[in-house]
Image: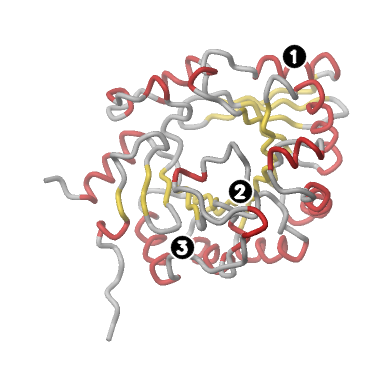
Amino acid sequence: MEDKKDTLHKIIKEMKLPYLRFSVTKDCNGNCAFCHNEGQGIGVRGTRSKICNSDLDLSKIKDIAIYFKKYFKIVKFTGGEPLLLNNFTEIVKVFHNAGYLCTLTTNGFLLDEQKQIELKNAGIKKINISIPSLNKKEYDKLFRVKGYLDIVLKNLKTISKHFKKVKINFMANKNNLQDELLKFDKLSKDCKIDISVMELITPGSLSEPISSEIISILEKKKKIKHIKSIKNSFGTKKVYTFCNGGTWEIDDFRESNYRKKAFDNKICSKCHMKDICTEGPYAMRLSSSGTLRPCLIRQDNLIEIGELNIYKKEVN
């Protein structure tokens, strides 16, 4: 039987997984209908959520950070909502001190200026803020908790003072493009924040990318100043900057050449579920309880972190 460490090494190498994606908690103060919660199941949601500590103690997290440094240079902290953790800044410091580039995905509700300063001092270099809509009624409908948007937008006013790299993840769909795009464009300009277009996609929508439609709408309203291409593990994504407007990052996984490159490895090419896969080999996901998940769609290739025997034995 193949050793778990050898199995993990082959998965990371063959799938070309670019970074460790650590879901530090499955709890969230939101309750978004479209959230996959990194595949780890749903925790306490919405107004029932409370400030808590991580499931894994800090000593085990240190062992994890040390072990995965040979594979990854980047760690992305996700949730649930990471800022619900009392000890989140301590977790960030562990990975920062181990030499990782540390980034955070958050809904921004708890991201006031004091928290921004704490995160910067702990080692966070980049923040992605999930804002599904700038229409209050639509935001409340998607977020399924009322009254958060104004607080999030207030927090955005100070964030460019403390972080150079900030992106908003905008959940686009064909129904909200016309109403939302220019609002997000203005927000991008006013707050000096990039907009990353994310679309709620399903297997049935794989053949209908909307990235070209987004650019078409923006082009009609604004003149493109310049376009920059950024390489990633499987291809390139384009970043558009508009005259007197914002900056947009378009990365459409459903584009045929992108999907072809993403699945061009020994593991994904033989996967029986690749035809309905909506994400591809995105990252090595680590759950809040210590389960490693190479992809979202499968349940038969999970590895429990304890099976790798990387934790240092406690001294009596």
Percent position of residue 5, x then y: 24, 51
Q: Residue at horizontal 26%, vertical 57%? A: 308
Q: 200 or 233, which lies in front?
A: 200
Quadrant, the C terminus = bottom left
Give the CA distance from mark 2 to mark 3.
20 Å
Please say if the residues under marks 1 and 3 sit with CB atoms less than 8 Å apart: no
Query: Which residue in the protein does label 3 denote?
Result: 98
Question: With 131 as the anchor, is 188 left or right in this view?
Answer: right
**SS of the residue at dot 3?**
loop
The quarter holding residue 297 reads: top left
Image disc number at residue 105 = 2
Residue situated furthest bottom in the rendering: 316
Give the CA distance from mark 1 to mark 2.
28 Å
- Above or below for 23 versus 233: below
- Can residue 188 be seen in the rendering of this structure? no
Question: With 158 as the anchor, is 237 left or right in this view?
Answer: left
Q: Residue at horizontal 61%, vertical 48%? A: 105
Q: Which numbered disc flags the more N-terminal residue, 2 or 3?
A: 3
Q: Residue at horizontal 40%, vertical 39%? A: 17
Q: Residue at horizontal 42%, vertical 22%? A: 276
- Can residue 204 be seen in the rendering of this structure? yes
Please say if the residues under marks 1 and 2 sit with CB atoms less than 8 Å apart: no
Query: Which residue in the protein does label 1 denote?
Result: 216
Question: Which residue type does callout 1 highlight?
Answer: Ser
Give the CA distance from mark 1 to mark 3.
44 Å
- Above or below for 198 versus 193: above
Percent position of residue 76, x then y: 53, 49
